[in-house]
Amino acid sequence: TLMKKYPEIIMFVGTHTDNTGSSSMNLSLSKLRSQAMVNYLVEKGINRENLRFEGFGSLRPITLNNSETERKRNRRVEFIIMSE
């Protein structure tokens, strides 16, 4: 809704995983997720030129990965408005 109301917005989509599995698998998984998020937004009418994305894998945790609760918090998608 925000991007349709303000079509000049540039949005960054960053995806993250927990540290379960190999680093390369997590990086690949998060890149696929970020691309899927962009594809979804484009299907909903958002201009692809206004979207940037990156998959970070398990490189940027927001908490430890010592419990399932912590791992769930690290598996996330972040949307950041880059400019208007």
Image: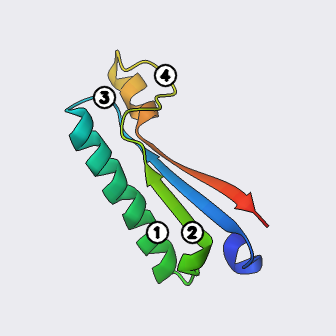
Q: Earlier in the sequence, mark 4 or mark 2?
A: 2
Residue 14, given in percent of the width and then of the height, sits at 50, 50
Task: Find the distance from the CA under tag 4 to the CA under tag 3.
Answer: 11 Å
Q: Which residue is mark 1?
A: 38
- The residue carrying mark 2 is 51
Marks 4 and 2: which is nearer the front?
2
The mark that comes first in sequence, 4 or 3, is 3
Between circles 2 and 3, the one closer to the viewer is 2
Using the numbered discs, state the Cα–Cα distance from disc 2 to disc 1 in whole angstroms.
Answer: 7 Å
Q: Residue at x 37, y 28 (%)?
A: 71
The residue pinned by badge 4 equals 63
User: Which label's residue is closer to the chain start, 2 or 1?
Assistant: 1
Lateral position of residue 32 relative to residue 25, left or right: right
Q: Residues within 10 Å of mark 1 (few under 14, many from 20)?
A: many
The three-letter code of the residue at mark 1 reads Val
* Frontmost residue, 49 versus 63: 49
Which quadrant would the C terminus be assigned to in this image?
A: bottom right
Q: Secondary structure at mark 4?
A: loop
Residue 50 can be seen, yes or no: yes
Tell me if residue 1 can be seen: no
Q: Compare marks 2 and 3 and give the one earlier in the sequence.
A: 3
Q: What kind of residue is marked 4?
A: Thr
Q: Secondary structure at mark 3?
A: loop
Which residue was labeled with disc 3? Answer: 19
Q: Position of residue 3 (x, y in %)?
A: 68, 73
Q: CA distance from mark 3 to mark 1?
A: 24 Å
